[in-house]
């Protein structure tokens, strides 16, 4: 064992003995205890990329925030009572909005390998998933949200395909709220649910009442098992009749629906059964036909693209074809078990693997459009663009500052090219969610990351013992 691991484990042991005295994690109240208050501050002299067509970019601009709301974005703002944050040498932009991430699997990163077929995502999630308790979910979500915030992600689409009980769903949602991140919880089946059994529709209705819109930070959705039979053993696969039944019930609740469709023919099945619509998000639609892409565009379905994971699949990412067909797209992390939570890298990988394809396409694509997909595009996909996704008076203050003076990025020419080509999470200096400054100078404020890490490590040991490994 190296020194770093030994120290981490020792720190973990101390934190764990203190933790035994605390109430059960999932029984905590929804108040984000310990998070910094929303105050009034003004970021001065930053290179502002507002992602708002009316405001545009300001090479030196100010952003004024009060009580969680953006009150002004301009070249110079009068805010005499506001705390001043020096934005010189920084890009100020909306926080990243990633649109699908299986947070329940975050702690499983210690077991997985992308280069060993026995230890990839599905064998490992299938092995450990049935042994999850609400505490496992709570701690796993918090571990991943630390990484998200550190990487400048201010909204996450938590896609849970292992909801084991109502208490389990509550624990994951509570973890998101406790971390101060904005998000959507997509409620799905537990791992191992027989394909002929519906998911717990009554509890989705209950969870909607309890959590949807909570503190303005939480949205609910339903995740559906796939209809294309891909990965049927682990994530479930249903026929069109089950999909029609479940989707109709969810639509009565006016909740959006999200589904993985990486196999062949899934979109055709959905389209033939009249199931597509603007309330649908599809994850990794690879292998699509021209007719399927046309159906996606016509029905305003969002494609949540996870470039790093998709670039490892046998079928190519059809980015150019999707653009030519007019399909709406957003970017997502998927999981952090064999990927990390780096939206810069995801933008870069998508641009890189698509370069040759785009040369053959009608559509042209710029770095600015890529950044727009990673911010406003994600907000539109998750239906939170009335609140976030751009820097504009009246919107909530979800924003990040990125240092442009660091060695890997300086000096910057076009700021969008710098973000797509050079930037990395280590350049993210400041992270603000709903007006709370959760990271400053690259360090957490009001979030005890070592404690969260210790809890995750403790949970991994418990999980191993329950799974008999
Ligand atoms: Zn996924």
Image (cartoon, grey):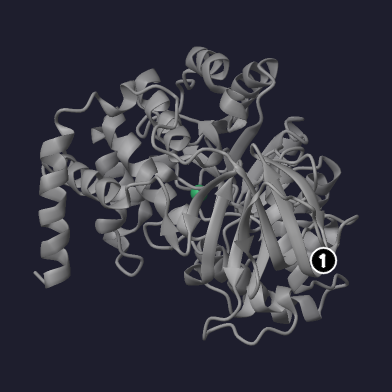
From the top left corner, tell me how far across and down residue 396 is, in percent: 69, 41
Q: Residue furthest front?
A: 80
In the rendered view, would you say 194 is above or below 207?
A: below
In the shown orientation, is residue 7 left or right of residue 74? left
> Relative to the observer, which residue lies in front, 28 or 128?
28
Identify the residue shown where x is 71% and y is 79%. Answer: 355
Identify the residue shown where x is 16% and y is 50%. Answer: 12
> Relative to the observer, which residue lies in front, 412 or 198?
412
Disc 1: which residue: 57
> Relative to the observer, which residue lies in front, 428 or 130?
428
From the top left corner, tell me how far across and down residue 388 is, in percent: 70, 44
Identify the residue shown where x is 66% and y is 69%. Answer: 91
Identify the residue shown where x is 25% and y is 42%. Answer: 128
> Relative to the observer, which residue lies in front, 447 or 255?
447
In the rendered view, would you say 197 is above or below 118?
A: above
In the shown orientation, is residue 461 left or right of residue 244? left
Q: For numbered disc 1, what is the local secondary structure?
A: strand
Question: In the rendered image, is residue 426 in sight?
Answer: yes
Which of the 4 quarters of the picture holds residue 141?
A: top left
Question: In the rendered image, is residue 285 in sight?
Answer: no
- Are there few (<14), some (14-19), or many (20+) residues within 10 Å of tag 1? some
């Amino acid at each position: 064992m190296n020194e770093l691991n030994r120290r981490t484990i020792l720190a973990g042991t101390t934190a764990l003995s203190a933790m035994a005295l605390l109430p059960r994690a999932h029984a905590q109240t929804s108040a984000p205890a310990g998070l910094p208050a929303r105050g009034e501050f003004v970021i001065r002299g930053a290179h502002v990329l507002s992602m708002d067509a009316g405001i545009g970019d300001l090479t030196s601009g100010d952003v004024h925030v009060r009580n969680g709301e953006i009150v002004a974005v301009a070249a110079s703002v009068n805010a005499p009572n506001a705390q001043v944050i020096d934005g010189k040498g920084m890009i100020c932009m909306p926080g990243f909005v990633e649109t699908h991430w299986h947070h329940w699997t975050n702690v499983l990163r210690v077991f997985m390998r992308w280069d060993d077929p026995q230890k990839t995502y599905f064998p490992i999630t299938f092995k450990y998933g049935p042994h999850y308790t609400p505490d496992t979910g709570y701690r796993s979500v918090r571990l991943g949200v630390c990484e998200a915030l550190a990487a400048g992600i201010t909204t996450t689409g938590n896609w849970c395909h292992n909801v084991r009980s109502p208490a389990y769903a509550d624990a994951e949602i509570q973890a998101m709220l406790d971390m101060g991140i904005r998000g959507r919880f997509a409620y799905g089946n537990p791992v191992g649910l027989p394909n002929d059994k519906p998911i717990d529709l009554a509890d989705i209705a209950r969870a909607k009442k309890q959590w949807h819109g909570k503190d303005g930070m939480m949205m609910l959705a339903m995740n559906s098992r796939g209809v294309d039979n891909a990965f049927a053993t682990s994530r479930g696969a249903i026929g069109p009749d089950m999909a029609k039944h479940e989707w109709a019930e969810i639509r009565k609740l006016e909740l959006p629906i999200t589904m993985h469709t990486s196999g062949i023919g899934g979109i055709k099945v959905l389209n033939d059964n009249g199931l597509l619509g603007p309330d649908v998000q599809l994850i990794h639609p690879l292998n699509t036909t021209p007719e399927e892409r046309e159906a996606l565009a016509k029905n305003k379905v969002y494609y949540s693209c996870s470039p790093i994971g998709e670039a490892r699949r046998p079928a190519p990412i059809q980015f150019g074809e999707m653009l030519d067909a007019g399909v709406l797209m957003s970017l997502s992390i998927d999981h952090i078990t064999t990927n990390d939570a780096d939206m810069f890298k995801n933008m870069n990988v998508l641009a890189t693997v698509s370069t040759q394809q785009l040369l053959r396409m009608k559509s042209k694509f710029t770095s600015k459009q890529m950044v727009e997909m990673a911010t406003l595009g994600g907000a539109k996909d998750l239906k939170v663009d009335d609140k976030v996704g751009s820097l504009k008076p009246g919107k909530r203050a979800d924003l990040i500052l990125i240092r442009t003076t660091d060695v890997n990025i300086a000096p910057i020419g076009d700021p969008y090219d710098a973000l797509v080509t050079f930037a990395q999470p280590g350049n993210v200096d400041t992270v603000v969610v709903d007006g709370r400054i959760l990271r400053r100078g690259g360090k957490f404020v009001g979030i005890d990351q070592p404690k969260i890490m210790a809890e995750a490590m403790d949970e991994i040991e418990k999980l191993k013992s329950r799974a008999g490994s």
